[in-house]
Amino acid sequence: MKKKVILSVTNDLYTDPRVDKVCRSLLSFGFEVLLIGRKYADSPTLPSRPYPCKRMHLLFRKGPCFYAEYNLRLFFYLLFLKSDILVANDLDTLLPNLLVSKLKNKKIVYDAHEYFCGLLSIANKPLVKKIWTKIETFCFPKLENIMTVSQSIADKYKETYHKNIAVVRNIPSGICPEVTETRESLGLPKNKSIILLQGNGINQGRGAEELVSAMQFIEGALLLIIGNGTVIPKLKKMITEIALSDKVQLIDRMNPDKLFNYTYLADIGISIDKDLSPNLHYSLPNKIFEYIKAETPIIVSNLPERALIVDQYQVGKKINNFDSQTIADAINEMINDKEQYARYKENCKKAAKELRWENEEKVLREVYQKI
């Protein structure tokens, strides 16, 4: 009989490619899989997947009441479900998973997508940070099977809790979705360079505001910002105030296969998170690997993990500060130096052969083989 793995996250599952990849890999390892998330009133319908998904309807959308409701609901849901292995994705699902694993004597895996207590969103909320830190310090010593998305985060957790942490980076599959669109079909100009910032967390500290401002100093280019986030209203206001509607387009989040059309058709991919919190400092964004997969050269902030990728594979440029002129200079240089751009693009093609989920999956398999 197949062992059943239940994974839980606090998002609506629509744009979480890491969890989807893990679920598909677990199926290929021979496990039965169930994925649990939440459902907003405006959550899109999930595309067909080879494993079942449960999205809980909640009364609260965010804040302490949301986390309390979600964790309580998840605890009782897990308590009465048959399972062999529970997987908590991030700290905001860990406590109910751990408690149920102890009550039912089940194995638990913790997959830390973030350095959670170092999130920018809780940096200036001492009480909130204290609560999450207490949850982490209560749970972490009781864990044996832990993985995370970057070596820097793994090292930080090992330093704090003296635990071995497996690193399974959030890298897309080597199999490319079919490119079904053209610039014309997407309404994009054929004679302009397309600059792309994509992601489901266009939030404070991601450099989006400075990137929009930089478009004042860039000609012959169009900036696309695709995704949701807390700074989107501010960006809309900036675009109007600076009169950049012909240079910047904001597009709502979309499923990964559709998004790949934009990534593939773009000329430059952007990932310029600021060094404003430990989590941002140690992070290794999935978008970097999505750009590389699409053979789209990148411009990144000079933070350890992403700088390592750029230096090792020579797939783009690094910037050291975030004033609009510096960002504009980096973009203009990449657009205008055709020979260097061609080298970056060829290096992306080579790097994509190595930077693929199928290689990360080997580490994932080792984690589950030990359970």
Image (cartoon, rainbow, N blue to C red):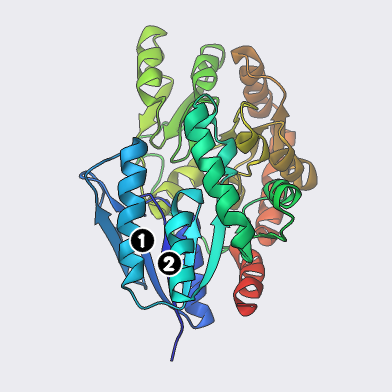
Is residue 61 left or right of 309 when viewed as pictured?
left
**Of residues 369 and 203, the one drawn nearer to the viewer in this rendering:** 369
**Image-quadrant location for residue 232:** top left
Within 10 angstroms of label 1, few (less than 14), some, or many (20 or more) residues?
some
- N-terminal-most mark, 1 or 2: 1
* Residue 312 placement (x, y as % from top left): 79, 46
Q: Say left or right for 334 vs 29.
A: right
Element class at badge 2: helix
Q: Quadrant of residue 366?
A: bottom right
Residue 100 percent location from the top left of the image: 43, 67
Can residue 45 be seen here? Answer: no
Instruction: Name the quadrant of the C terminus.
Output: bottom right
Residue 334 position (above or below residue 266): above
**Residue 115 placed where, x, y %?**
60, 43
Between 335 and 96, the residue placed more toward the observer is: 96
**Residue hosting label 2:** 100
Report crowding for label 2: few under 14, some 14 to 19, many 20 or more residues within 10 A (C-alpha).
many
User: Residue 369's image quarter?
Assistant: bottom right
Farthest residue in the right direction?
312
Relative height, residue 78 to residue 308 (above, below): below
Label annotation for residue 136: none
Residue at x 66% of width, y 16% of height: 326
Relative vertical location of residue 11 with respect to residue 207 in this rendering, above or below? below
Residue sitting nearer the eye, 357 or 341: 357
How many angstroms separate mark 1 from mark 2 (CA)?
7 Å
| Residue drawn at (47%, 33%) of the image | 128
Name the residue beneath numbered marker 1: 75
Q: Residue at x 63, y 71 (%)?
A: 367
Circle 1/circle 2 CB separation < 8 Å: yes
Amino acid type indicated by mark 2? Val
* Residue 135, image x, y percentages: 52, 47
Three-letter code, disc 1:
Phe
